[in-house]
Image (spheres, rainbow, N blue to C red):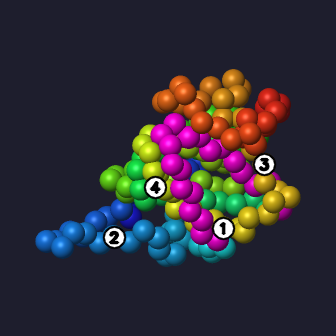
Amino acid sequence: MKFNETKIAGVFVIELEKHADERGWFARAWCREEFAVHGLPTDLAQTNLSHNTQRGTVRGMHFQTAPDAEAKLVRCVAGAVHDVALDLRPESPTFKQSIATELSAENCLAVFLPEGVAHGFQTLTDETTLFYQMSAPYAPESASGVRWDDAAFQIQWPIAEAIVCERDLSFPDFTE
């Protein structure tokens, strides 16, 4: 795996190192030792799938608060998404800044998000599935988020006609 640092400390875009032959290819998608070398969590508490039927669907921007904060490794295994990491750590020099990465079944990229970084995505194709690995189990009482279109963050989404659930629309305006 190749770990590519981003402008947001602790957020990595991870490329697979594919070993190909006439059958196809094989690649390691997660390795405790390689994550440890980069100072990333090596304990996995939960794995989730998110399937989205329609192009333009937005999920986010989600995170869990302390004491249940979680790090995430996110990969698209079907279709393609515009994936966004938003730094919500007040002490960070990139506080309120975001990065976006196209994740797709074709490019096999993954994004690692540390605790304190919110996550969201917009589907670029119909029938899109994301695979998440989490460092902490889901805790409903700690589930939180900020609005995907909050002007405080100026996130650029590729598809104007977004499909957004009521919960994600109901997050209040961000205040520091």
Q: Is residue 55 magenta?
A: yes
The vertical placement of 159 against 67, above or below, is above
* Disc 1 residue crowd, few under 14, some 14–19, many 20+, Cα 10 Å: many
Residues under numbered marks 3 and 2 in contact, where contact means CB atoms less than 8 Å apart: no
Residues under numbered marks 2 and 4 in contact, where contact means CB atoms less than 8 Å apart: no
Q: Is residue 176 left or right of residue 46?
A: right
Q: Nearer the viewer, residue 105 or 96?
A: 105
Residues under numbered marks 1 and 2 in contact, where contact means CB atoms less than 8 Å apart: no
Q: Secondary structure at mark 4?
A: strand
Instruction: Name the residue at the front extreme.
Output: 53
Residue to which mark 4 is pinned: 76
Residue to which mark 1 is pinned: 135
Q: Which numbered marker is on residue 27?
A: 2
Q: Main secondary structure of the magenta part?
A: strand
Magenta residues, as a range? 46-67
CA distance for labels 3 and 4: 23 Å
The type of residue carrying mark 2 is: Ala
Residues under numbered marks 1 and 4 in contact, where contact means CB atoms less than 8 Å apart: no
The type of residue carrying mark 4 is: Cys
Upstream in sequence: badge 3 or badge 1: 1
Front position among marks 3 and 1? 3
Q: Is residue 142 visible?
A: yes
CA distance for labels 1 and 4: 18 Å
Residue to which mark 3 is pinned: 144
Q: How many marks?
A: 4
The vertical placement of 34 against 84, above or below, is below
Q: Position of residue 50 (x, y in %)?
A: 57, 57
